[in-house]
Image: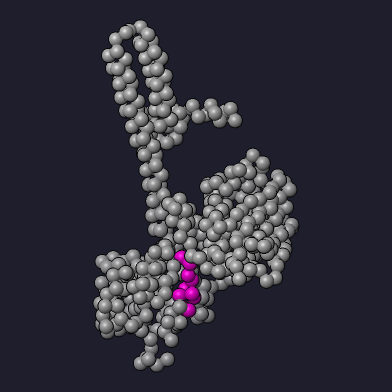
Amino acid sequence: MFSKFLDGFNFIARCKKYKIGLWQCPNFLFLVMGVVTVTAMVGTYIAARRFDDETVTVVSVSLVVAVIFVIGNLIIRGVERIAEADILKSEFISIISHQLCSPLSAIKWNLEIIETEKTPEHALSDKQMLFLDNIKKSNEQMLKLVSDLLDVVRIDQGRTIFVKEKVDLSRVVREVVEGLKHLTDSKKIKVELGIEDNLPLVVADEKKMRVVFDNLIGNAVKFSNDNSKVLVKLENNTNNVKFTVQDWGVGIPRHQHDKIFEKFFRSSNASRYRTEGVGLGLYLVKAILKSFGGEIWFKSEIDKGSTFFFTLPSVKL
Amino acid sequence: MSDANKKKILIVEDDRALQNALLEMLGQEGYELIPAVDGEEGLAKAASEKPDLILLDIILPKKDGYEVLADIKKNPEIKDIPVLILTNLEEISDVQKAISLGAKTFMVKSDFSLKDVLEKVKENLK
């Protein structure tokens, strides 16, 4: 706590991080302004006591106001520079991601052509098919990353324009669990489904809800120990549908509990188990749920596992 | 399918790798295919070949997909040919713009497999 407070004064390091000069750095300038203000007040007090002449007071006060004005202006420019850099960064990510879409789609479609070759003499051997499948999976991973990045940029720019349609979450959950089969099979994890009958529909974007389930259930599986189980539940509450996913895996250290929904955050505990991922999943999940009026929370204990919950308002019949 | 009633598809796509994959897949299905690599060529071929269906990219050299689509709809001879948009733009505003200009459907390349594209083509050739 105290170190954090001190850290705030370490403006030289901060300014270096922002990649701007000292005289453009708001943190430094604010300190300078503080010093000037205090000196000026003390100075004016002394001057007013020592001299009876009003002009001295008027001139010194005007001077101080001018200096504060200039510094204030510099602070605003500094903040603007930082804000502009942030906008540029978002645009950069957006352009690069869009440019990656075309070649990645081309790889996907061309792989599909090879895979679906019908003439027997051109058919691939099992070994070739296996390696082709590896390429396909890597490509899908890249496509997913690009799609996540584009979503993050949209959210950052306040353009969360998802489709709003009535969605049957139970069907989406079943399909996502089926899609994770290769992962659950390879870790020998049993996914137990507890889906209530006659679940009401919710208003959401089905494609984005896939992203939500894929991340939440996928995480539960990835951070589980082999040969264990993951529990997935969908319940009908009075006004909403509640989703629960529980694992008995590595868990999240307590001091990281308030950070896990932050952008680019990766738990130190998680990284020990897998290195893939850039820390966008939960950030996206929270933003998506929020845009449909939902809420997300979790409980977790290290080495005992995590449980994630979310609710989405149900459609009134 | 005899050659006389073989359905004709115009593919306006500037990315060769994507164009090739589409040509191969639709060719296997027995369609007659006309490739075009920019907006102007696409529009000219739409008018001269009068295809049964048009697959149209949006980001294209010379003339973008929206302009091509608008021009197609202005020409009474070809305005009823179904146009399917095949792009990597996926903002809601892009979809709305294309649909309001008269596109039949909007497909995002990274979300669609060739099989999905084929399905949409068949659906719109009925």
> Where is residue A186 drawn, in percent x and y?
67, 61
Q: Quick check: can you spot residue A182?
A: no
Question: Which image quadrant is residue B43 in?
Answer: bottom left
Q: Quick check: can you spot residue A12?
A: yes
Q: Start and end of the magenta stretch?
A: B110-119
> Where is residue A288 drawn, in percent x and y?
53, 57
Q: Is residue A110 magenta?
A: no
Question: Which image quadrant is residue A24 in?
Answer: top left
> Where is residue A200 drawn, in percent x and y?
63, 68
Looking at the picture, tell me which residue is in the foreground, B116 or B72: B72
Q: Residue furthest top?
A: A50
Q: Looking at the image, which residue is at 57% across and 68% down?
A: A167
> Where is residue A178 drawn, in percent x and y?
64, 67
Q: Main secondary structure of the magenta part?
A: helix
Q: Looking at the image, which residue is at 35% across and 10% down?
A: A47
**A129 to A246, vertically: above or below:** below
